[in-house]
Image (tube, rainbow, N blue to C red):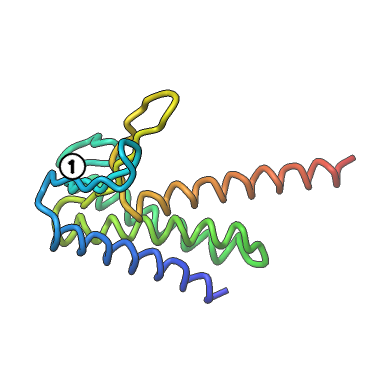
Amino acid sequence: MWKFYGLAAIVIALDQWTKWLVVQNMELRERIIIWDPYVALLSHRNRGAAWGMLQGQFGIFTIVTVIVIIGIIYYFHKEAKGKPMFQAGLMMLLGGAIGNFIDRLWRKEVVDFVDVLIPIINYDFPIFNVADAALSIGVVMVIIFIIKEERAEKKKVK
């Protein structure tokens, strides 16, 4: 079970390393095109939550993040034993939450740098980072796990 904490540690380390690289090597608002016009690195700072909501609400983020971290660890130890997809999803959530929390505590803002334009619908997706990606992947993994569990329970009832 403890090996899954390694996944969270990898997410945190990769998140902090990539953010450090951006801060050290790019000017604020500097854009480096990777695949024009779809993918670029864009040095950006966010003092809010996802998509810039609740700008500057440091106290709220601190309380919510601590509660979320406690909840993830609780569910990991009480509900996820023997359920590797659930365990991995929770650890992706934990790594992402801690990665962005470190930024808020240390920098008072979150470093974002991945800029993606979604073709066909021409949607400029909000700028994100490794922690944000881990949070999204973790949510998807947990949702898939829950759906599979519900289907398995329905089969048992029949």
Location of residue 44 by image quarter: top left
The reply to whether residue 58 is in sight is no
65 relative to 17, above or below: above
Residue 88 rendering spot, x and y as whole percentages: 55, 61
Residue 152 rendering spot, x and y as whole percentages: 78, 47
Helix, strand, or loop for circle 1? loop
Location of residue 81 by image quarter: bottom right
Q: Residue furthest bottom?
A: 2
- In depth, the one of 63 and 82 nearer the eye is 82
The kind of residue tagged 1 is Gln
- Looking at the rendered image, the quarter that the N terminus falls into is bottom right
The reply to whether residue 100 is in sight is yes
The residue drawn where x is 53% and y is 76% is 3
Q: Number of marks in the image?
A: 1
- Looking at the rendered image, the quarter that the C terminus falls into is top right
Residue at mark 1:
57
The residue drawn where x is 56% and y is 49% is 142
